[in-house]
Amino acid sequence: MDPRIYDDYIDTKIERINFNKVFDLVKKICDKKESVEILDFCCGTGVFPRKWLIKLNNIKYLGVDINSNFIKFAKKKLKDNRFNFVVDDSVLFKTDKKFDIILATSSYHHIKDNRKRAFLKNIFSHLKKDGILIVYEKIIDTFSNKIEAVDSSTQFYLERIKYMMKTEKLSKNQLFALFNEQYLTAIRHEEYKVNFQYFKDDIEASGMKIKEYIKLWPKKILFHNDKVGDFVFLIVKN
């Protein structure tokens, strides 16, 4: 995806609400510390540090993404020596540093299912003993085969897109990005979303546990499964 389209996609009401919650959680941690080291896996175009984290004065940030065009765009848009970006595979990335906060906002679902636990174990290895992993994820319903995966993801995005169209005016770029994400999730190519229990099992198998989770959307019942929607998770080492 063109970095400009991705940036436009993030600039929707529902995504701003979700990233506002992530920022509130980050800020609460930062308010208690003199300095905070943040590692952001699958940082994309750097929209979160550029529009949210820039407000904090006591952080050092490292963003990692495999998309070189996104990283080039991020570096161009955010020229601040507190913020650094590197091109790398988030499953394989290594540094000797340990971090107070690791961010995985819309990251886990971009990792193929057979690499998800390796990704989370890599996060574990870079997290300080008392560090916090903050995850923002879109969680879909349970499925056991390709046809059920199509049904689960299509239903999720149909309701989400309808909600967004009712509550805000979407640009052509935003609509394209949303329906493209629905399509990719349905065919499980570049978008590998899973159900709540699958995510929880992966977290626990990686030596961590969910300390708290917040459901941001939907606020009312849209699905028979209340564990379907947009969630922010606070995760710690076991």
Image (cartoon, grey):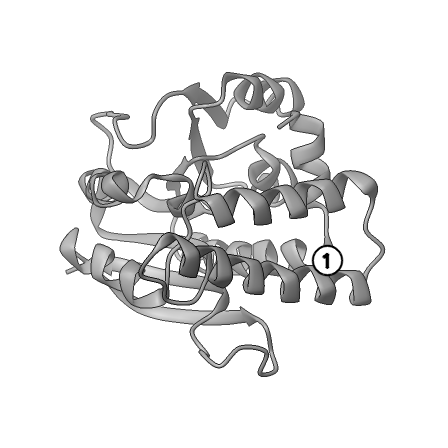
Tell me the residue at 50%/27% (across/down): 83
Q: Amino acid at mark 1?
A: Lys
Q: Quadrant of the N terminus?
A: top right
Answer with left or right where residue 41 lies relative to residue 201.
right
Answer with left or right where residue 140 lies relative to residue 122.
right
- Which image quarter: residue 168? bottom right
Q: Position of residue 163 (x, y in %)?
A: 72, 67
In this rendering, is residue 119 above or below 23?
above
Answer with left or right where residue 15 lies relative to residue 113.
right
Tell me the residue at 44%/35% (across/down): 42
Tell me the residue at 77%/38% (across/down): 173
Using the rendered image of the protein, determine whether residue 160 is visible from the camera's viewpoint.
Answer: yes
Q: Quadrant of the C terminus?
A: bottom left
Q: Residues within 10 Å of mark 1 (few under 14, many from 20)?
A: some
In this rendering, is residue 200 above or below 180?
below
Who is closer to the viewer here, 104 or 35?
104
- Numbered-mark total: 1
Answer with left or right where residue 93 lies relative to residue 222.
left
In this rendering, is residue 233 above or below 105?
below
Using the rendered image of the protein, determine whether residue 56 is visible from the camera's viewpoint.
Answer: no
Q: Position of residue 72 (x, y in %)?
A: 57, 16
Q: Position of residue 35 (x, y in %)?
A: 39, 42
- Which image quarter: residue 98? top left
Residue that numbered label 1 is attached to: 13
